[in-house]
Image (tube, grey):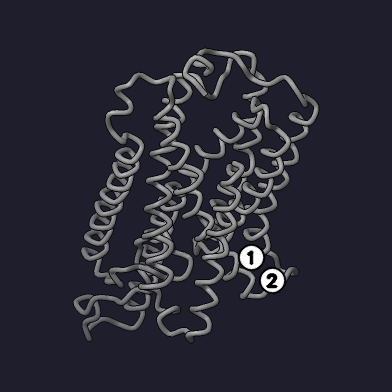
């Protein structure tokens, strides 16, 4: 297609399948909510006993989905968007999409490094020591402490048993709160990257001429991605004070793409996803989101789950192989969907 055939201005959204596009808001809401909320609610249910293997399968499958989303569904489109013929030639002089993704990776790393060092110093001043990896079950994005070990200076023989018990209880509560906050920060980082992506998906679906194919693909896309998010949320170990966080995070994921579709339908007479402004905004956001999900997927999920996890280090070769296969299956399936969306 020549540059003269490209619509770089406003408008241009398709007016076909209006009824089906409106229905897609609710269909994708159901798919997204099912994928994200089912693992969270099933984990809390007293009557629905889901086997542990189901959670583990969803967790490792979800890790693969998140990594594939970063490469295929975010970084790939970002390269195309920031290389659009609608943009000035200066955008083609440098790989801005890759640079922005790299910037996001280092920003997340520095933020987590500072938060980790601050939390470690604060706990140390209170006599609590912990595993520096902080890879307890469910803390995929948390560098919080694992079960506490009271410092010896707080355990003098002269203390009564009651004093020691009170100190341990107080430190344990502090540890749980610190760990919970770390996990919540990790959830926010993961959700931020995914939600931006989901919003742009909704906007595109509302105006894209090839609606039918894209609609079917996005149903699977959002359900699988929701399953990956939901399985991670279900593994979080939070105190009663923060017990609502996984449900709220899952609901936010479920409604983001439908909101994007609704907004897109409202502005489709003026919104053109291929316009100059839309290409820049979408390209920059996709690049940053790709960096966030790459860091989360490779560092917080893969490294923590396979290399630093005490549970996995003691697991049989068969279990490790099963986890890797689940991860690769999620990656492969999500990458395949990238053929159409």
Compared with 202, 217 (above or below) is below
What residue sits 55% from the left and 47% below the top? 249
Indicate which disc residue 328 carries. none
What whole-number distance in Å separates the C-alpha atoms at marks 2 and 1? 8 Å
Query: According to the image, label 2 marks what residue?
Result: 50
Indicate which disc residue 43 carries. 1
Image coords of residue 275 (percent x, y): 50, 19
> Furthest-left residue in view?
153
Image coords of residue 22 (percent x, y): 75, 29
Task: Determine if residue 192 is in view.
Answer: no
Compared with 155, 95 (above or below) is above
Q: Of label 2 and label 1, which has the lower sequence position?
A: 1
**Image marks 2 and 1: residues in contact by CB distance under 8 Å:** yes
Tag nearer the camera, 2 or 1: 2
Closest to the observer, 226 or 16: 16
Q: Would you call the spot at circle 1 few (<14 residues within 10 Å), some (14-19), or many (20 or more)?
A: some
What residue sits 75% from the left and 69% below the top? 47
């Amino acid at each position: 297609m020549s540059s003269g055939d490209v619509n770089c201005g406003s408008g241009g959204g398709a007016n076909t399948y209006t009824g089906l596009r409106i229905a897609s808001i609710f269909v994708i809401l159901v798919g997204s909510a099912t994928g994200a909320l089912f693992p969270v609610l099933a984990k809390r249910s007293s009557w629905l006993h889901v086997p542990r293997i189901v959670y583990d399968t969803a967790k490792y499958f979800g890790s693969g989905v998140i990594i594939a989303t970063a490469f295929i569904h975010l970084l790939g489109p970002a390269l195309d968007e920031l290389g659009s013929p609608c943009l000035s030639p200066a955008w083609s002089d440098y790989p801005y999409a890759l640079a922005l993704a790299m910037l996001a990776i280092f920003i997340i790393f520095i933020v987590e490094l500072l938060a980790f060092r601050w939390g470690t110093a604060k706990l140390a001043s209170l006599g609590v020591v912990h595993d520096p990896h902080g890879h307890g079950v469910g803390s995929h994005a948390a560098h919080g402490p694992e079960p506490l070990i009271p410092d010896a200076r707080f355990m003098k023989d002269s203390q009564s048993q009651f004093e020691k018990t009170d100190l341990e209880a107080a430190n344990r509560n502090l540890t749980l709160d610190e760990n919970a906050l770390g996990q919540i920060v990790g959830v926010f980082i993961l959700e931020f990257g995914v939600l931006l992506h989901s919003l742009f998906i909704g906007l595109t679906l509302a105006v894209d001429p090839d609606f039918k194919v894209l609609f079917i693909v996005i149903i699977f896309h959002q359900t699988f991605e929701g399953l990956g998010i939901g399985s991670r949320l279900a593994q979080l170990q939070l105190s009663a004070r923060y017990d609502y966080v996984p449900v709220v995070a899952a609901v936010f994921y479920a409604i983001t793409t439908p909101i994007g579709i609704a907004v897109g339908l409202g502005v489709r007479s003026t919104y053109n996803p291929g316009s100059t402004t839309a290409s820049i905004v979408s390209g920059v956001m996709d690049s940053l989101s790709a960096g966030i999900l790459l860091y989360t997927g490779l560092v917080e999920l893969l490294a923590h789950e396979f290399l630093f996890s005490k549970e996995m280090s003691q697991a049989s070769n068969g279990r490790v192989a099963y986890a890797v296969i689940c991860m690769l299956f999620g990656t492969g399936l999500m990458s395949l969907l990238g053929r159409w969306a």
